[in-house]
Amino acid sequence: MEHEMVPLSSSMTQYPDDHDYLSSRRTPHPMTISYEVTVVIQHHPLFITAGDRAYRLNCIYRQLESTLTQKINIK
């Protein structure tokens, strides 16, 4: 799916908030969720230049499993 880019300034562009470019994955052991996205820093809106860079960002969050108990009085 091609995304329409919304220019914010001459040096920054933002995608619409539809999250198609963001991938997530859960793993059971250990319980984690990870998000991955590729960020492209492009110095010209139309041309690829030698200074352009692409970075793949991967954030991993460990999920803790805990049991909560609470006594309640019902009258």
Image (cartoon, grey):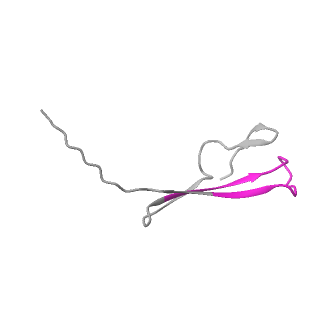
15 sits to left or right of 50: left
- Residue 14 falls left or right of residue 11: left
Q: Residue 44 lies in magenta, yes or no? A: yes
Question: Where does the image place residue 14, in percent across and percent down from the top left?
Answer: 70, 42
The image quadrant where one finds the C terminus is top left
Residue 6 on image: x %, y %: 72, 39
Against 61, residue 28 (above or below) is: below
Give the quarter of the image for residue 52. bottom right
Query: Is residue 20 found left or right of 9 in the rendered image?
Result: left
The reply to whether the magenta stretch includes residue 39 is yes
Residue at the spot x=42%, y=64% of the render?
28
Residue at image x 85%, y 48%? 44
The residue at the far top in this view is: 75
**Start and end of the magenta stretch?**
33-57
Q: Say which of 3 and 33 sits in front.
A: 33
Q: Position of residue 70 (x, y in %)?
A: 23, 44
Relative side of 60 to 13, left or right:
left
